[in-house]
Amino acid sequence: MDTTIDTGPTGNERLVYSVAEAGALLGISRAFAYELVARGELPVIRLGRRRLVPKAALMAFIGLEPANEAGATGSEPAVVDVHKSVHTPAQRLAGS
């Protein structure tokens, strides 16, 4: 498996990775990648039962902010549930 993240502006680059693929790119085990997701340290997009790691979130996790999001505000990563709306970890704990 290729363990590089392509940051070039090509039209066929992937925008999301599976949790296992994100773990491989980070050089950690699949189990630890899922543990990071469960702890809320690695943001994911939820599509039904699938959990996908956005490329931008993966780059931010390793400290390489994408150029188009470098000025984004907000200290908490968002988790997107396609059946609901965007929630930060604090909102999920508060039940909103």
Image (cartoon, rainbow, N blue to C red):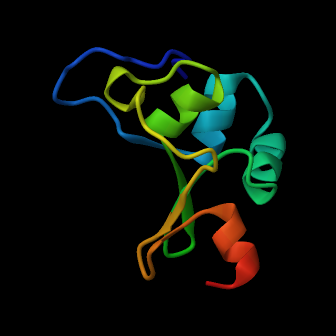
Q: Image quadrant for the N terminus?
A: top right
Q: Is residue 14 above or below residue 81?
A: above
Q: Is residue 89 above or below residue 12?
A: below
Apparent side of residue 27 relative to residue 1 in the rendered image (left or right): right
Question: In the rendered image, which quarter is residue 79 located in?
Answer: bottom right
Q: Compare residues 32 and 56 and report the one nearer the observer.
A: 56
Q: How many marks?
A: 0
Residue shown at 61% from the left, 20% from the top: 63
Apparent side of residue 83 relative to residue 51 in the rendered image (left or right): left
Give how far across and how far down residue 3 sits, in percent. 56, 18
Residue shown at 68% from the left, 74% from the top: 92
Residue shown at 82% from the left, 46% from the top: 31
Apparent side of residue 85 relative to residue 75 in the rendered image (left or right): left
Q: Compare residues 56 and 10 and report the one nearer the observer.
A: 56
Residue shown at 21% from the left, 30% from the top: 12
Q: Is residue 95 above or below residue 64?
A: below
Give how far across and how far down residue 82 sits, in percent. 41, 73
Q: Is residue 40 above or below residue 68?
A: below
